[in-house]
Amino acid sequence: MVKLLTANELLRGDVLWWNGSGWSLSIDDAVAVEDGEALIARETPAERVCDLALIDADKVDGRWRPMKIRERIRSFGPTVRADLAREGQDWH
């Protein structure tokens, strides 16, 4: 199990994933972080994102799978209507 860094985009609230050099809308672009606390300390003052959090995840069939259902839902998109979910995201 590894740690991924996730956050919300400050203005729109989109769920974001740390990709090693910046933020992505897709969990598939996420990279495992070694020193997540240092990364959080560096990114927080920039005020580009909010609610930074380290989450547990594993690779399943070549894709990230968050361990907690809350993070799986966040990675997929809205749960109210399927047509609002980001394209290319399978529920896993």
Image: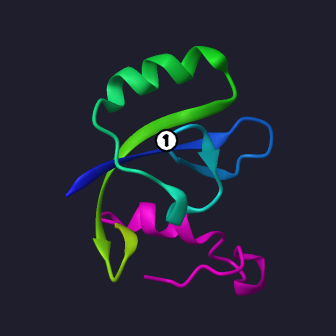
Helix, strand or loop at label 1? It is loop
The residue furthest left is 1
Quarter of the picture containing the C terminus is bottom left
The residue identified by callout 1 is 20
- Counting labels gives 1
Q: Closer to the camera, 84 or 21?
A: 21
Q: Residue at x 25, y 52 (%)?
A: 2
Query: Residue 58 at what x, y percent from top left?
Result: 27, 66
- Lateral position of residue 60 relative to residue 26, left or right: left
Q: Is residue 29 above or below residue 7?
A: below
Q: Residue furthest top?
A: 45
Q: Is residue 18 magenta?
A: no
Q: Is residue 73 above or below residue 2?
A: below
Q: Nearer the viewer, residue 73 or 80?
A: 73
Q: Residues within 10 Å of mark 1 (few under 14, many from 20)?
A: few
**Residue shown at 49%/41% (left/top)?**
20
Q: Is residue 47 left or right of residue 68?
A: right
Q: Residue furthest front?
A: 21
- The image's colour scheme reads rainbow
Quadrant position of the N terminus in the picture: bottom left
- 74 is higher (above) or lower (below) than 6: below
Would you say residue 73 sits in the magenta stretch?
yes
Give the quarter of the image for residue 7: top right
Residue 10 on image: x %, y %: 72, 35
Residue at x 63% of width, y 51% of height = 24
- Which residue is at 56% across, 37% downward? 21
Q: Is residue 19 above or below residue 81?
A: above
Residues in magenta, as a range: 66-92
**At label 1, which amino acid type do we have?**
Gly
